[in-house]
Image (cartoon, coloured by chain):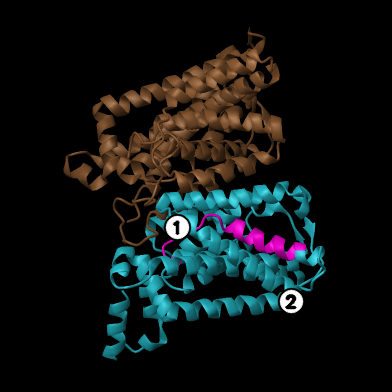
Chain colours: A cyan, B brown
Amino acid sequence: MSGYASGIVAILCINLIFAYAIFVTAAAGQLNLGGAGFQAIGAYAAAWLSSSAHMPASVTIPLAILASALVGFLISFPVLRTRGVYMVLATFAFGQFVSGFLLRSPTFGGAIGMVVADYVGVGALIICAVLTTVLVFFLMASRLGLAIRSIHDDELVSTIMGVNVRAVQVAMFTLGGALAGLSGALYAHHFSFVEAQYFNSLLSIYVLLFVLIGGTQTAWGPLVGSLFFTLLPEVMRVGGSWRYVVFGVVIVLMMVLRPQGIVTRALVARLSPRNWWPASSNGAKRVADAG
Amino acid sequence: MSEATATTSLRSLPVRPILLAIAVLAAIAVAILAGGKVIAQQMVSGLMLGSIYMTVAVAFTLTIGVLNFLNFTIPTLFMLTGMVAWGVLSRGYLSAAGGWGWLLALLIGIAVAVVASLIVERFTFRYLKTRHGDATEHAIPLVSSLGFLLIFEHLVLIALGSEAQRFPVPFKADLYALGLVIGLPQLASLLLALGIVATLTYVLKRTRMGRALRTIAESPDTASLLGVDVGRIVPVVFILTGLLSGVAAALFTVNYGDVSPFMGEHIGTKAIAAMVLGGLGSVWGAVAGGLLVGLAETLSIHVLGGDSVQMVVWGLLLVVIILRPQGLFGASAIGKAKL
């Protein structure tokens, strides 16, 4: 693999894991616009453990996941008091607070950033991305996944049907924190350098866009979204700024034409191999159910 | 469900914006009496900066209050005004206007912001029509506005470059009172900003259009049942948004004399903070919040150093939005049902 290609693959893997971190909360109806904050916690935990405590990546990455999962768990209680626009603002404030804190903290290098000792190759990144994808697909296919979907569609009805909404939402925030931490730790170890300025509000915005444009109904959404938005700028070799203009136009058009995201449950059902032969009445029924 | 908000909130404190204003003035007086001229000067510049934040915060709070929509294009509209004004001035299109070219340029900038805001309305404000009925649908206009943020910002970068530019304003008049330096344009902008907000409050409270806006804020469906032409009233919010952001940018440009393609981000985040402090949907809350953030910023730079501002402001904001989602000053003026 050339340096250019492996660079793109690395970013794609990190973005994909990060997108799944935001997806698991969004799938349960909670928008997290502070993703960069969670990712920064993972990245800085890994960087600090690696540089100051001289631990290998095999130790720092699990510890970084643990740290950001813990933060996700703890922050979920106050954040889940809020809804809608308030939750967007609260998580946004959280992300800004974390990057502001890191920028000011001398322990973590402040504005200068930190050099990370241990290097993790692109192969490990691919393995982690694949495992995350499989995990989230499994999650969405499980009983818990059903609860997540029902909360996404109607919280009140889910409560009535006996779903412990609060517990599921807390679990998703914790899992989201863990996955964001994983993506951050991988970022730190792969690029060997972290700085607070990278984990800015624009990063939080982009990753939320990956998820919402991809679609929050199925686990395919973040996969398609992050593939689309990581590869689109590479494919469109138009000059610098025009690329972002096109990106913006694509986003606006998507929201006008297909606000539920690229991949929906109905689309997945239609493309599923089980429904390739419409003669089977069972398959047709499944499409109807999913739609 | 998505329109409801935090279930629990603390008992409403009996704080009124007017009381806060008096407290601030009293604090300035005390600071001057104590001989803390440096602090007093900081407070004056904080209030001036706050008047800019306040105008932008009112734009944010209006869109949230009426449409439940966090409009991320507002910082871009702010930037658009400054950069377009600089663009038309520096390319010499306005040389015929002579000494008043700068004013004409700013007016053109504001007009561009209003038009841009209407374009945003055309493509984002769709959720009255599209309801696929799940928990993330309120994010649709938000996501579109993020798209527009990218479009406008990068169009400006293409057309006008990424450099910060000096915007020449032909006058510089300072007022000396009680040993403090008060810039006349700053004072004028504080008064102008307060005037705009007062007018807006009057329009919302007393006029037919204001009543229509408040009805939409409570419930778009009920509003249209009661004969409010929602499709024609909603653009008014966006015109006001463009106008407020544009005027704030014009005031900023006149006061500080420079523009850049990134001028909106800093102002935008501070204005969001101001809106949250004042309570989402509350116009006078945004005014008080804007002045408060302006003060907090200059004072914390003075006391703690520049790096800490982001941490202090956003940490405070997180606490406020979780503990007092209705803002520091109690009930909101518009869109009560959403709070």
Local SS, label 2: helix
Q: For the image shown, how many numbered marks are present on the structure? A: 2
Give me the chain letter of mark 2.
A
Residue B228 in the image, given as x and y percentages of width and height? 21, 38
Where on the picture, by quarter, is residue A215?
A: bottom left
Q: Nearer the viewer, residue A30 or A11?
A: A30
Q: Quadrant of residue B135?
A: bottom left
Examine the residues drawn in magenta and state their main secondary structure. helix
Label disc, if present, on residue A80 of the rendered structure: 1
Q: Which of the image's four quarters has the N terminus of chain A? A: bottom right
Residue B5: in magenta span: no
Q: Nearer the viewer, mark 2 or mark 1?
A: 1
Q: Nearer the viewer, residue B179 or B253?
A: B179
Residue occupying the point 57% across, 23% down: B47
Report the span colored magenta. A27-48
Q: Residue at x 66, y 15 (%)?
A: B34
- Quadrant position of residue A289: bottom left
Does residue B49 appear left or right of residue B207 in this picture?
right
Query: Looking at the picture, which amino acid does disc 1 mark?
Result: Leu
Residue at point 41% right, 25% down? B197
**N-terminal label among 2 and 1:** 2
Does the image show residue B231? Answer: no
As for residue A36 lying within the magenta part, the answer is yes
**Residue B245 pos. (x, y %):** 49, 32
Callout 1: chain: A
Instruction: Tell me the crowding category of disc 1: few under 14, some 14 to 19, or many 20 or more residues within 10 angstroms, Cα based.
Output: some
Residue pushed farthest bottom? A280
Residue B222 visible in the displayed image: yes
As shown in the figure, which amino acid type bears the numbered disc 2?
Ser
Residue A244's place in the image compared with A20, above or below, is above
Circle 2 residue = A58
For marks 2 and 1, give the CA distance.
33 Å
